Image (cartoon, grey):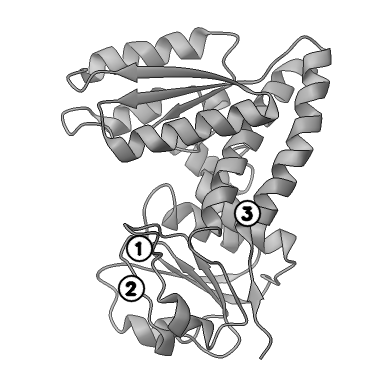
Amino acid sequence: MEKLILDGTKVAEGVKASLKERVEELKKKGKTPCLATILVGDDPSSETYVRMKGNACQKIGIDSKRIHLPEETTTEELLAVIDELNEDEKVDGILLQHPVPSHVDERAAFERIDIEKDVDGVTSFGYGQTALGFGKYPSCTPAAILRIIDDYEIPVKGKHAVVIGRSPILGKPVSALLLNRDATVTTCHSHTQNLPDIVKQADIVIAAVGRPEFVKGDWIKKGAVILDAGYNKGNIGDVDYDACYENASAITPVPGGVGPVTISMLLKHTVDAAEEKTFN
């Protein structure tokens, strides 16, 4: 069986190339898109992610406003910062880096983000719009998965998609997006019984469980498409890549699969938001 490696780096580069042109058009109108990122505390992984997002903005001409708050920041102080960014006309998108310190009410902070600036798709309002099929800015990893599917023209309509994971910014929204594309969707989680048997029925497998090499090769039926949204220590995904590769017709690598496209979708949503304000 011919294997198709779903190259997320290539997809992301295509997205960013088109965004560069759109950013140039906005600048002609006197508008530079701006993404504000908020980091609370000193988690090294979070610092790296925020830096990567800032660098990605710079490469396509988007302004990046970085706010780094100390570990002891209270929920009220964080909400006040988000309020300021909501009011700032120059800011088009707001990203609160997850996770925040345990004493901060992360959900309250997410909900404070203006829906027009929720480019990371973290508010319940945004999720509801996505589920109903008219959300402007779905969560970025689900949006990335759909972008890869579209770029590689993978059929979704009528297919059985199994999503392993039900987080509010990955498993749940990607299930909704696939359902809106007329897939038959089974959403699995840590309490799902007979998980391998369910995965064996899937035409499309979305792995979003946060456990290294959790999905085994003998769970995959011949010809299934696998999109691995996991990223674990040591550049390892949620899928046992070598074993699953044997049965899959198409598969995303880790790294170089869903990850780069996720960042490009964050940039896209920021440009979309800037265009919304400038041209409408």
Return the residue nearer the eye: 97 or 16.
16
Front of the two marks 2 and 1: 2
**Residue picked out by circle 3:** 9
Secondary structure of residue under mark 2: loop
**Residue picked out by circle 2:** 214
Q: CA distance from mark 2 to mark 1?
A: 8 Å
Please identify the quarter of the rendering in which residue 103 is found.
top left
Secondary structure of residue under mark 3: helix
Q: CA distance from mark 3 to mark 2?
A: 23 Å
Q: Residues within 10 Å of mark 1 (few under 14, many from 20)?
A: many
Q: Quadrant of the N terminus?
A: bottom right
> Which kind of residue does numbered mark 1 sit on?
Val
In this rendering, is residue 133 above or below 86?
below
Percent of width and height locating residue 159 = 62, 77
Residue at 55% over, 58% down: 256
Residue at 71% over, 44% down: 15
Question: In the rendered structure, which disc, 3 or 1, sits on the residue that comes first in sequence?
Answer: 3
For the residues bearing labels 2 and 1, Cβ distance under 8 angstroms:
yes
Q: CA distance from mark 3 to mark 1?
A: 22 Å
For the residues bearing labels 3 and 2, Cβ distance under 8 angstroms:
no
